[in-house]
Amino acid sequence: VEGFFREYTDDENRKESERMEACILSSESLRQIIVCFRGSTANQAKPLGKNSLFGKQASCILDEEQKVPILTTFRTAYFGTSLEKTVFTLLANLETRKPFFDVVMTGHSFGAAMATIASLRYASSNSQMRVSCHVF
């Protein structure tokens, strides 16, 4: 285990804060750095609604560099914490210690959405690295 991080976000429209976690592992035999994302139980249970990917919720874009449609819920949760900065800083450190390792992002349900966003942003800013995303 290379690191474990837990961040909370407070949305003024919600009573409770939402939790996101990331666990970073490395495997010498696979030559991989594995980043596992997990959202809170409350996030896992949120219904997205019928056809929400193409409805009003998908009207925002990820950011100015990656102009891809994304559900507002996922964008708000991802950028609502400093988890990206924390994880990317550790990955930069691990790149120097393990230069020929691939980066694999993974997650389940809400964590899968966070892993997908993170892998897109990390791969875009680190073109020299092989980055993959395995979600379920």
Image (cartoon, grey):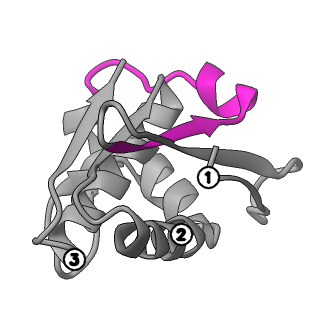
Q: Which mark is residue 2?
A: 1
In depth, the one of 14 and 116 nearer the eye is 116
Q: Residue 13's x, y, as percent? A: 75, 58
Dots 1, 2 in contact, CB < 8 A = yes
* Residue highlighted by disc 2: 90
Q: Amino acid at mark 2?
A: Leu
Q: Residue at x 42, y 22 (%)?
A: 49
Can residue 36 be found in the magenta stretch? yes
Range of magenta residues: 32-52
Q: Residue 89's x, y, as percent? A: 51, 76
Mark 3 neighbour density, 10 Å: few (under 14) some (14–19) many (20 or more): few
Q: Which mark is residue 125?
A: 3
Q: Secondary structure at mark 2?
A: helix
- Please give left or right for residue 1 compared with residue 47 in the image: right
Please tell me in which quadrant of the rendered image residue 124 appears: bottom left
N-terminal of the pair, mark 2 or mark 3, is 2
N-terminal of the pair, mark 1 or mark 3, is 1
